[in-house]
Amino acid sequence: MEYRFELNKSISDSDLSGWRDLCRGHDDAFMDPEFIAANESALANDCRFWTLLVRDPQDRPAMAACLTSLSVDAAVLSGDFAHRCVARIRRLWPGYFKFRVLLVGLPVSAGQSSVAFAQWADRSLAVQAAERAVRQVARESRACAVVWKEFDESEVASLADLTRMGYLRADSLPMNQLEVAFRSFEEYCSSLRSKLRYDIRRSQRKLQRAGFHIRRLDGSEGADQWYSDTVHRLHEAVVLRSSTQLQMLPAEFFRELARRVGKQAVFYFAHKGERTAGVACALQGRHAYELLFTGFDDEANRRADLFFNLVYARLDEAMRSGAKRIHLGQNADTFKARLGATQRRRWIFARGCGILKPLLHVFGGLVFRPIGLAPPRQVLREATPASVGSP
C-alpha cells in the first residue's frame, strides 16, 4: 500500500503530537513547532507556508517536512563567472534570474534541512508520497522551480529517489562545524597553539579597551525588547555585504524567535553604555548548538573585533551547555577554519517547472558549480582523537 500525505497551511493546524513524536529523535532545533511558527508569523508578507506529514498504511507519521513558496536569487550558488554575468545584467534588469521557488525547507537559511523521517519508515515510499504533495503545491503556487534544501551526508542518501524523479543534485555551501571536546572556551583556548591563542586574547583585550560589553539574553529574558529596529540595521548591513544571501529577514522574525522559542533562542548584544554596536543570535538544540546571524557596526568592529568576540561568546556557551557539535554557519570560512572548524558538505535537489525544467538540466552545470572543501587545520598544541578540528 502507498504512503499518503496530508498538507496544512500552518504548523498550528498540523498533528502536533505526531509531529513532535516523529521529530523528537532528531538532533534538529529547526523542526521545533515554535521555530516553524516564528517563520510563519514573521514572514507571512513575503512567503507562503505549508507543513507536510506523510503517513504509512497504519496511519503512523513516517515523514515530516516544511514547504515555503518565495522569490529567491538563483545566482546565489553560481560560479564566479556566472555570478559576474548576472550582476552586469541586473544593472538594467534588477529582477533577472530571480524566480518564484517552492522550497522543501524554511526560508531561514542556516544550512539545515526541514525534513525528518521516522526511524522505521520506508524512506523511498515516504519520499514518493512527499513528492506528490510537492508537485501539487508547486502547481498551485506557480513555482518556476522546486528546491529541496539542505542535506548532509547522513540525509542525502535517503533522498536518492529524487534524482530519478527529475531532480538535479547540486552542492550547497558547506557547513563549518566544531566537534566539542572542551567544557568552556577558556579550556579550549588553553589547548590552542600559541599564535592562535594570542590572537584571541588580543581580540578580547580590544573589546575591553574600546569599552564594549557583551550582554547575553535568551528569549525568556526579554531579548525581543532589546532587539530594536536600530539593532536590526546592524544585521541588515552585514547581509547586504554578503554574496550568499537568500533573503533579508525582517526584525520581527528575530523578535518572534525570542518570544516563541524562549530559552533555546539566545541573543548577544555588544554595547557601550546605551549604544549597541553588535548583535548575534544562536539556537540551542539537544546535541548541536547553532550559530545563526550576526550584525555589527563596521567602525566599532575595527576598534573592538566585535564579530570575533560575538563568536567567542557563543562558543563559550555552547561548550558549557554540553553540546556535542557546534555549527558555525556557511560563511567566514577562513576565520572559522583557524578556530579548528572542519567543513561538512551540504547538498540541494533542484527541479525546474515548465520551461525551466529542460533549461535547468542543460545549464545546471553552469549555475550550480561544485564547491570544494577547505582543508582542516591543526590548531591544538597536541592532536588527540577527540580534538577540535578532527573529522
Image (cartoon, rainbow, N blue to C red):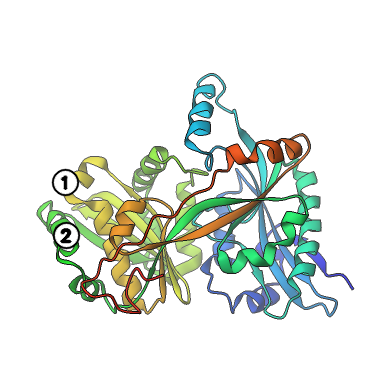
Q: Name which residue lies at 81% across and 57% down.
A: 132
Please give the name of the residue rendered at 41% of the width and 66% of the height, measured from the top-left corner: 219
**Split into 4 quadrants, where in the image is the C terminus?**
bottom left
354 relative position to 27: left or right:
right
> Mark 2 — residue?
204
Q: Is residue 12 visible?
A: no
Q: Secondary structure at mark 2?
A: helix
The residue nearer to you, when weighing 184 against 45, is 184
**Front-lying residue, 113 or 171:** 171
Tell me the amino acid under the disc marked 2: Gln
Residue corresponding to mark 1: 303
* Disc 1 residue type (three-letter): Arg
How many tags in the picture? 2
Q: Nearer the viewer, residue 331 or 246?
A: 331
User: Residue 167: where, in percent of width, then height?
Assistant: 71, 50
> Viewed as shown, does residue 4 lie left or right of 267?
right
Q: Is residue 94 above or below residue 141?
A: above
In the depicted structure, whether residue 225 falls above or below residue 19: above
Which of the 4 image quarters holds residue 320? bottom left
- Residue 82 percent location from the top left of the image: 53, 32
Q: CA distance from mark 2 to mark 1?
A: 11 Å
Residue 379 seen in this snapshot = yes
Q: Crowding near pointer 1: few (<14 within 10 Å), some, many (20+)?
A: some
Residue 126 lies, in percent from the top left, at: 76, 68
Based on the displayed image, in which of its 4 quarters is residue 329 positioned?
bottom left
Viewed as shown, does residue 177 lie left or right of 168?
A: left
Who's the residue at 53% across and 47% down the image?
370
